[in-house]
Amino acid sequence: MKDLFSLVGKIAVITGASAGMGKAIARILGLNGAKVVISSNDETACSNVFEEFQKEGIQVTAIPCDISVKKEIDFLVSETERQVGKIDILVNCVGIAIPGSFLSINTEDFEKTMQINLQSAIYLTKKVIPSMQQKKDGAIIYLSSLSSVRGNKNLGLYGISKAGLAQLARNLAVEFGPDNIRVNAISPGVIDTEFAKPMTTNSEIMERRIALTPLRRIGKVEEVAGLALLLASKAGGFITGQNIIVDGGTTISDGN
């Protein structure tokens, strides 16, 4: 029982790991024994997180990568294998949100959103799964969103792309379950990050949102990271194909 959350001997790649939930997930996986590879398109931020994690005793490697570029994804995987080893855990935390109504969606915004939020995850996963099949072991986690299960008139395109990640998790869980590869998605509600600042700094929006949330607050990055640790470890060994909502109860509340 004491080793249920241990990731000693595991190699974890976390994209979008230079800030917010991605950084928190990388930290908690590292603190529980994983060798973590942090990656984002911000090379300076990656270097800063690398130094920060090293001071905490985390076994960390930084490999910057713009996940909108396939050659950089190729490099991320090959360099991880060269420097650290075969990937056991993949956590995809990259995402962009372009606001706008349905009628304002244009080809450029659609292609950019789908490329970064969905297509890059598909491409990266295809690079990682074969080695997991060989080992008959692996855990893949996609950071989806509450927008994947609710309608949204201003972030509909973002929601569509994140719903794609949740469905991708279900599809891959079925196809690769016989190889002992578990695939899940996490759908956070409003979490205290820079990404959520447009909402969290708007008092009118937050007053309504918190009134609809039973816990009467927004979430913390470590509360999402804790779930990622569960899904990556033996403790979550019988969980696959799920889109787990972390929202303080917002989706189940009637506002009372």
Image: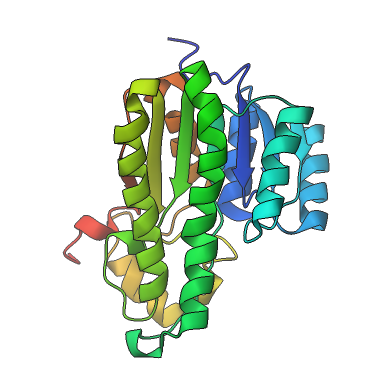
At a point 64% along the width and 54% down the height, the residue shown is 70
The N terminus appears in which quarter of the rendering? top left
Q: Confirm whether residue 97 shows in the render.
A: no
Q: How many marks?
A: 0
Q: Is residue 70 visible?
A: yes
Q: Residue at x 26, y 71 (%)?
A: 151
Residue 162 position, x and y percent, is 40, 59
Question: In front here: 216 or 112?
Answer: 112
Q: Nearer the viewer, residue 22 or 82?
A: 82
User: Seen in the image, is 69 located left or right of residue 145?
Assistant: right
State which quadrant residue 184 falls in: top left
Image side of residue 45 versus residue 12, left or right? right
Furthest toward the top, the residue is: 1
Quadrant in the rendering for residue 85: top right
**238 shown above or below 101:** above
Task: Give 40 or 210, whichever is nearer the viewer.
Answer: 40
Q: Is residue 87 above or below residue 153?
A: above
**Residue 13, position in %: x, y?**
62, 37
Query: Residue 83, how many percent across, how many down?
Result: 79, 29
Tell me which colouring the rendered structure shows: rainbow
Image quadrant holding the C terminus, namely bottom left
- Left or right of 204, for residue 21: right
Using residue 30 as the reference point, say whether residue 174 is left or right of it.
Answer: left
Vertical comparison of 153 with 182: above or below: below
Q: Residue at 43% across / 59% down in the picture?
A: 218
Q: Residue at x 59, y 48 (%)?
A: 22
